[in-house]
Amino acid sequence: MRTKTLLAPSLSALAERFARVRALTEALVAPLSDADATVQSMADASPAKWHLAHTTWFLETFILRDFVAGYALHDERFPFLFNSYYEAEGRRHARARRGMVTRPTLDEVLAYRHYVDAALLAVLADLPAVAIELVILGCHHEEQHQELLVTDMLHLMSENPLEPAIWPAMRKVPVAMPGPIGWIEGQAGIVEIGHDGEDFAFDCEAPRHQALLSPHAIADRTVTNGEWAAFIADGGYADPRHWLSDGWAWVKAEAIVAPLYWEQGEGGWTRFGLDGRRAIDPAAPVTHISFYEADAYASWAGARLPTETEWEAAASTHDPAGGNQLDGPGPVEPRPSSGGAAFFGDVWQWTGSAYRPYPGFVPAKGAVGEYNGKFMSGQCVLRGGSCATPRGHARASYRNFFYPHQRWQFTGVRLAKDI
């Protein structure tokens, strides 16, 4: 990670940010019962209670335990339960069995959070610079888990036959279908990508480096639900010509016929969201699609997926805090575009790039060095943030990554082509 060196007057701003981030996490789970917060709907997702506790364990372990003399752990059993994947921190509860942790209760986990919050804020002014950087990392880490929390809640509720709504639907004004996709001619030649400032960035975003781009164009918007429905109607999921071999095997093995949460009834396609099941909005960006689906659609459309270098070069002049992003609790979902080339928000955009280290990448020392580098195998890069990404969390250099079959996140597609 990289951060600015914080001067004393900045500590109050950090304390405010810390409190704001921690409060948002708890606001997101406010509609959940203890049972809702305990259940794990699949191995890729985690219970809400676990997200609440893990983000707290991160702060307690890497800051309070390591930098505050005499700090007493809230509960010596919790590190085993709430470590995620840090091998340097020893044994941990199996990821796929997190839903079996019925105790501690949701109220006890919230009490754990409040204990750690109070302890950290009490010593914030006395922490060394390296620990302050970890507080900043902890805020960004929790924002990542806020997005995971929303998407895991959505998947959990979709598994309930009642398909319960967590929040009431937003009032919507009908929006007309956008016109045909327009094309933005991209930069060609040598460009620079990667994080280039002193502000915070995750380690995998650096170092800034040169890359070569061939002549290309990138779409001025993401693909819509209406366009995806046309792909389905044209037999897109049944035509192996458009699919990578692994993707076609996945489609057949899993009987995939539409994006996740879509169902077809007498009235047409519907989708399930945190506001319940509703008709799809044909003008809104399609979401909950895998890399395999995104790549197949691009092939069907006579285009391809952008590389992450092409995407970053195009997005670098756009406001990363703009667009439809998470501002608070409520039914998050992609919304129809209001015009302009919105590169941030609504849906994460699959790229054609593998998640691998940049030239000169060096993991951080210690356990936090396991944060990103250890996952640089077999995953694909996504860019741009989504409607579930906390506003202010994304930036042009931000690299998200998932396995090609995963689609429970708000993932969509922006096309590119050679020219």
Image: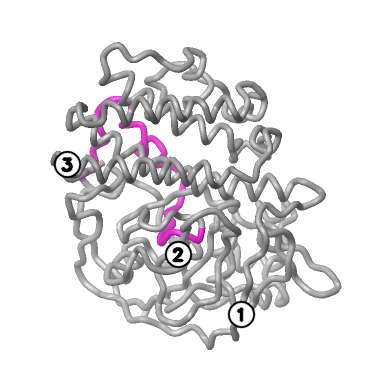
Residue at the image point whose x is 21% and y is 72% from the top: 189
Q: Nearer the viewer, mark 2 or mark 1?
A: 1
Q: What's the CA distance linking mark 3 and mark 1?
A: 44 Å
Task: Quadrant for residue 100, please give it.
Answer: top right
**Residue behind mark 2:** 345
Q: What stretch of residues is rendered in magenta?
A: 360-387
Q: Element at badge 1?
A: loop
| Residue nearer the viewer, 21 or 306 | 21
- Quarter holding the N terminus? top left
Question: In the image, which disc is placed on residue 6?
Answer: 3
209 lies left or right of 316: left
Cα distance in 3D space between marks 2 and 3: 29 Å
Residue at left 43%, top 77%? 219
Drawn side of residue 114 relative to residue 149, left or right: left
Mark in front: 2 vs 3: 3
User: Residue 368's quadrant in the figure?
Assistant: top left
Secondary structure under tag 3 reads loop
Circle nearer the N terminus (2, 1): 1
Measured in 3D between alpha carbons, the distance from the residue under mark 2 to the one under mark 1, in whole angstroms, is: 19 Å
Q: Which mark is residue 173?
A: 1
Q: Is residue 170 above or below residue 155?
A: below
Answer yes or no: do the residues labelled 2 and 3 have beta carbons within 8 Å? no
Instruction: Look at 71% across and 54% down and name the residue there.
Output: 165
- Horizontal relation, residue 261 to residue 65: left or right: right
**What is the three-letter code of the residue carrying label 1?**
Val
